[in-house]
Amino acid sequence: EFDPLEIWRAARTCLETAVQNLIILDINPLDIVAIGVCNQRETTVIWDRTNGQPLCNAIGWCDTRTSAVVGGILQRVRGKKNFLKSVCGLPFSNCFSAVKLRWMMENVQMVQEAIDGDKALFGTLDCWLIWLLTGGAEAGIHVTDVTNASRTMLMSLETCDWDERLCRFFRIPMKILPEIRSCSEVYGYINEGPLAGIPIASCLGDQQAALLGQMCLKAGQVNCTMDEGSFILFNTAQEIIDSDHGLLSTVAYQLGAHGQVFYALEGAIAHAGSSINWLKRTLALELPPVVDTIQTSGVGLLPDGSATPMMSSICSTGSPGPFCDGTTLVGRKSRFDVIFVPAFSGYYTPYWRYKARGMMFGITLQTTSQQILHAAYEAICYQVREVLEALAKDCPTWPKLSKLIVGGDLSEQPFLVQLLCDLNGLAIERPQTSTPACLGAMLAAGLATEILSIDQFRHNCVPPIDIFNTAYKSSQRDMKFRRWKMAVDRCLNFDSVSEHDPVKLVFDGRDPDYYVRSAIPGSLFIVSSFALIVVSSMLQQNGFV
């Protein structure tokens, strides 16, 4: 969870620091034409409209405290996790805002009291910041954009407006919801501070902003962003595709109040960089110092850029450069037999099992910290492959995917990008920026203020790219992927061991054949037994036995 006021203070500091840096660079802050907002999606805030005070802490997008709410909803709909998917594009999951808001209403007394008193306002982080930037309790504008609204489970994908049926289902009053606008228009003006009077001209969820910033503007283009989590968005243009294989239908972007709405299929991976940080901080893995030449390259496996001994063990010391090439992993027998499934918040795409839990397999007394970290990075790549396979099943008539565009902080690690390339069998394009979402917010703001066109952006703002190609054989990657799938199956069924499982029956001191025998009706057992006795007697009399 997060303190919404801390987020607001951080946003103000960001604006003030940006102005100071412009002055240091001898750039006039008055040259700023507009600002854009790009935010972590689904994180839910509810506050008092009369004084601007949050009614409780914001609940983050991968928080699992709402599991009981999800379980209760699934009981209501008899386990149909896709019950509302045809309307909002989303299955029931801890991830989405409606479930978090429902939890707040049920568990925080102040929230329900404020709603009853007509004092409460709800929003995701973009909505909260825009409301404060434009005046807060005195004159704040309560708006959000279509990309963030599409992640709440309360918006109809077809109409791009709040759906009364969905609000009734979750028992959420529509009066607390913000107005839904496009991603690229002037919502209001900054009320105070060094940028007072500057328009707020764009608003997008971070993954959709990355899709826009990577210039994936045509149907069939796909983008993968790897940060705390990992998200794959596939542009489907004006077509809403209802996935049968665990992908989400969502809004990609709408550029202008009268612009066409573009949609996307999305695969969501809850834990990517966060699983690496968990291994480093919670398990306190201690790595010996690196003595290889890779130490001087400044490029390592971990998100903070530090080198690891695993990198040295994978990259040959005679390599001509600081990065691994694709043949290194193929040329030697893999010693990394550990499998790590980081289902800390349940398992998202393609299964959407909120009760799944993380597991680690293949650990022996010889297992090292390097092997565990390597398994965590492999887990990111395997989960991306699961999403891409689901995408191929949902879009069998679309052209086969031949390349993947990646971005995000984790994409700065060349080893991970090469591993992603090897384990998925795709060429990888990595623009030389780790923050494509900022480029997307900038493009949307430039379009809204008519100082930038898409062609100008493509010509002047798109960074150069690095290209990665695979040297893995398909048989190698398929064998490793099958082992991953077996591990995932055990994680998905972590807390749902069948009452008929022979292992469970033996441990409970019961006969494992009991259910087999009890499944046979008694009368059928008696008649069939009698018939067998008669037949055996006849065969014996006739000399056949």
Image: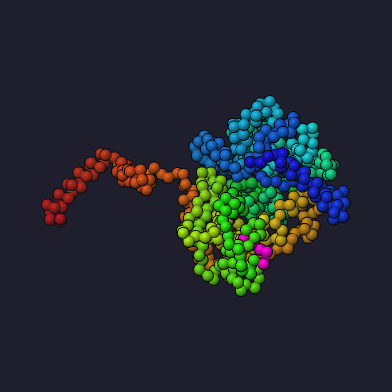
Magenta stretch: residue 430 in it?
Answer: no
Residue 156: in sight, yes or no?
A: no
Quarter holding residue 197: top right
Which residue is rendered at x = 87% and y = 48% of the image? 30
Q: Main secondary structure of the magenta part?
A: loop
Left or right side of 493 for 323 = right
**Left or right of 470: which side holds 444?**
right
Q: Quadrant of the N terminus?
A: top right
Percent from the top left, x then y, of residue 4?
Answer: 70, 39
Task: Tell me if 136 is positioned left or right of 398 in this view.
Answer: right
Query: Is the residue 176 above or below the residue 212 in the image?
Result: above
The structure residue drawn at horizontal position 12% and vertical position 55%, both measured from the top left corner, is 543
Count of number-bearing discs: 0
Q: Quadrant of the C terminus?
A: bottom left
Where does the magenta region start and end? 296-301
| Image coords of residue 471 (percent x, y) | 58, 68
Quadrant of residue 458 within the rendered picture: bottom right
Residue 281 vs 131, above or below: the answer is: below
154 or 303, nearer to the observer: 303
Residue 397: x, y in percent? 58, 56
| Residue nearer the viewer, 285 or 393 | 285
- Expressed as whole percent of the image width and height from the top left, the position of residue 129 reads 74, 41
Q: Residue at x 48, y 61 (%)?
A: 366
Q: Outermost residue toward the top?
A: 117
- 439 above or below 100? below
297 within the magenta span = yes
